[in-house]
Amino acid sequence: MRRIDLNCDLGEARRGTARWPASLAADSGADPADVALLDVVTSANVACGFHAGNRPTMTATAAAAAARGVALGAHPSYRDAANFGRTAMDLTRTEVTEIVVFQLVELDMAARRRGTRAEYVKPHGALYNRIVRDGEQAAGVVDAVLRYAEAAGEQPLPILGLPGSAVLDRAEAEGVRAVREAFADRGYRPDGTLVPRGEPGAVLTDPDEVAERVLAVATGRPVAAADGSEVTVVAESVCVHGDTPGALGMARAVRARLESAGVEVAPFTRAPSGSPPSGPAPSGRAGAATWDDDR
């Protein structure tokens, strides 16, 4: 049976928004919009405090994800809360390692308090984009994953990123599982790169169109490129953006179309029945680089 993972960025409360004080209330749980998406997606990329989120949001989102069998991923970024992690920074390899390790520890400790675990790493925003091409910063991310694995006495967490990116190449070279992702609501060029935002065809808004494209990716069929040609996008996971208008309806349409076609929608960190797991199980529970300056 074909299978695909659906991932989404969650736990992104920001200072200066209504979500921030609500997240700090004594009786606060996960954000209701996040909870609705957790009923649809299979992997949650949780903000670790540097671009958004805080310890209460990490803990609450981890608990909500665990209750639904959703895999929990660390979503580290540059220290850039003012710009939501979208400003590139010229950090050294060592500096990147330090900020990623710090954020991975923060999320995993929050998760462990709720009987679950971080199962993978997907960098956010400008860091995600930078490590498509910057080999030194890409190496810093992989170093962080390896350092944390050594400290925990476990296998390294998989890294989720763009096909053909420097970070996935480095991960594979170091024996870290590299997981390729596609984007549900973004247009592609004939060479497999994303159509830059602001250009015609960059963002797709029709749920039925998006659902059919994701089904094509999941079943190994080509999708229409912006110029009318066809391009094949190879991915184990598909990102459904949670902050775009109509995101929940689109995510539901995508999952419904996949399941109606017999595609299993499941976390990429969880092996099919009868197969060995690809990474550490949570406690208590059984192509071309597609870079764009703003995913």
Image (cartoon, rainbow, N blue to C red):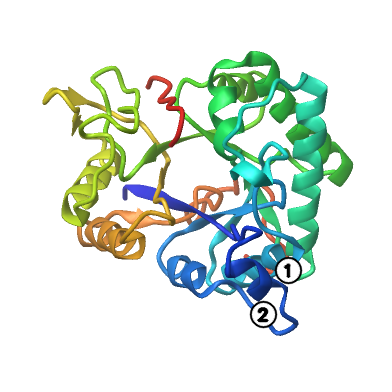
Left or right, 154 with respect to 29, comes to right
The quarter of the image holding the C terminus is top left
Residue at 65% across / 66% down in the picture? 20
Extreme residue in the front direction: 16
Residue at 39% across / 51% down in the picture? 240
Using the numbered discs, state the Cα–Cα distance from disc 2 to disc 1 in whole angstroms.
8 Å
Tell me the residue that label 1 is attached to.
56
Q: Residues within 10 Å of mark 1 (few under 14, many from 20)?
A: some
Q: Position of residue 98 (x, y in %)?
A: 82, 33
Name which residue type carries label 1: Pro
Q: Residues within 10 Å of mark 2 (few under 14, many from 20)?
A: few
Q: Position of residue 256 (x, y in %)?
A: 26, 63
Name the secondary structure under disc 2.
loop
Mark 2 touches mark 1? (CB < 8 Å): yes
Name which residue type carries label 2: Ser
Extreme residue in the bottom direction: 27
Tell me the residue that label 2 is attached to.
28
Can residue 168 be seen from the camera position used here? no
Residue at 47% across / 53% down in the picture? 8
- The circle drawn on residue 139 is none
